[in-house]
Image (cartoon, helix red, strand yellow):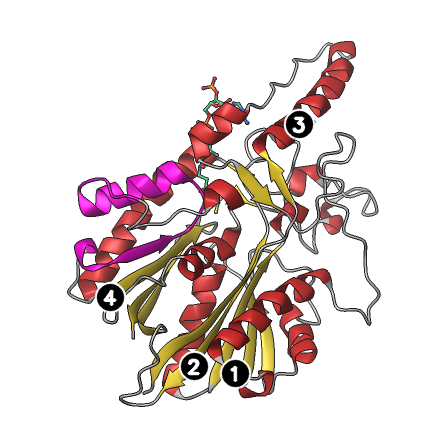
Amino acid sequence: MHRVIISGIGVEIPQASITNEELVESFNAWVDLENEERAARGEEPLQKSDSAFIVHASGIRNRHVFEREGILDPRRMTPRIPARADDELSAQAEFGVASARKALAQAGRAPADIDLVMCSSSHLQRPYPAIAIEMQQALGTEGAAFDMGLGCSSAVAALHVAVNLVRSGAQRRVLVTTPEIITGHLNFRDRQTHFIFGDASVSMVVEAAAEGEVRPGRFEVLDTRLWTQLSSNIRTNLGYLTRAAQDDPYRIDLEGNLIKQVGNKVFKEVTVAGHRFIVDFLAEHGQTPDDIRRFWLHQANARMNAMILKLSFGHEVGHDRAPMVLDRLGNTAGAGAVVALSENHADMKAGDYGLLCAFGAGYSIGGALLRMM
Ligand code: COA
């Protein structure tokens, strides 16, 4: 069995961004248009969205997006990402490659040093050929590549697999990539969810360390853990059988098949499950939350993270203990916790412990116990 380290982390945040105010203005302009039609049909009007509510309920003030054009147009409310030819790099692979190159550079590794690419994301652009295989070709990595996904736990789920493949000696070095273009599947006309998500791409290089080898500033992965339990409270039904369920298979009911969630149920249920996961996982290693210098939690909701930490510690803890990036990035699905990790570890000392923990659709929760080398 090999010791396993994360030798490099890469983050790609798109330049384009959208504030709450911009998003709410466009949503409310659409509501005005829609309500005129509803009034003519004698239907109840839709309610408007509100920036102050968004900040209070979620902590989100801004999000970055892969493509801004189209999102704020009240007659479209979807990013305009043109289709590419089959011989061009697809949008998601391109986004993955951008963070992967940064992770490789930080690891000091060439693409040929990698023998497996895993693209693990809450959404995959298509079933095949795998996005990871496109990335393999674009980067020039060796061996194999495949896609997987587990909602917002996608990055930690892939880390769980990668760490165990490297630990067992089955792979030498694995590139785990989570390119999240979640705005492409978001219903910007749904008041409950239109403000939640943003786009980001993260990558990690996972490799073996020799006995006694120290790579200062890098993390050793002591253990990883996954938990799932079925819930439809965060769900999308869009898939390859969607058209087969329609009377007219060539006119798909897209709106009814986009992301939907029962936010307040998710909040309550995942807060409790997340707290239990953290406390139990740490207990298996003879640790309590007090032993952990830093928590890089899933970035969905500021109040939710505060509650999970309060339940786990027995008192409130600040952002130095559990950094927040969702205020400026929104919920970037699988990428969020890794962005928090990437931006908040340079001050940690050798021997400090950290816990990466993501949670979301499934329900799913994944964790990795790390120690600074
Ligand atoms: N603007 C203004 N008001 C809004 C609104 C909006 N955009 N969206 C909802 N509201 C209103 C509701 O209509 C409701 O009004 P009422 O009390 O008069 O009925 C009120 O706000 C509270 O709604 P609720 O859904 O209970 O809000 P909340 O406090 O639970 O916050 C979320 C909503 C989505 C921010 C929160 O539930 C959440 O973040 N949940 C977890 C999501 C999550 O982690 N998902 C995981 C994805 S990985």
Q: Secondary structure at mark 2?
A: strand
Residue 216 lies left or right of residue 280; in this view the side is: right
Q: Which residues are magenta?
A: 289-318
Q: At 50% from the left edge and 81% from the top edge, which residue is drawn?
A: 108
Q: Secondary structure at mark 4?
A: loop
The reply to whether the magenta stretch includes residue 313 is yes
Pick whichever of labels 4 and 3 is earlier in the sequence: 3
Give the amino acid type for the residue marked by disc 2 in the picture. Glu
Pick whichever of labels 4 and 2 is earlier in the sequence: 2
Q: Secondary structure at mark 1?
A: loop
Give the amino acid type for the residue marked by disc 1 in the picture. Arg
Give the image location of residue 372, x and y in percent: 30, 70
Q: At 78% from the left edge and 31% from the top edge, which residue is drawn?
A: 75
Taking depth in this image into account, of 170 and 237 the one nearest to the observer is 170
Residue on which disc 2 sits: 207
Question: In the drawing, what numbered circle is on residue 27?
Answer: 3
Give the position of the N terminus as an image quadrant. Answer: bottom left
Q: Is mark 3 within 8 Å of ligand 1?
A: yes
Mark 4 and mark 2: Cα distance apart in space: 20 Å
Pick whichever of labels 1 and 2 is earlier in the sequence: 1
Give the amino acid type for the residue marked by disc 4 in the picture. Asp
Q: Is mark 4 within 8 Å of ligand 1?
A: no
Marks 4 and 2 in Cβ contact (< 8 Å) = no
Residue on which disc 4 sits: 352
Pick whichever of labels 4 and 1 is earlier in the sequence: 1
72, above or below 288, in the image: above
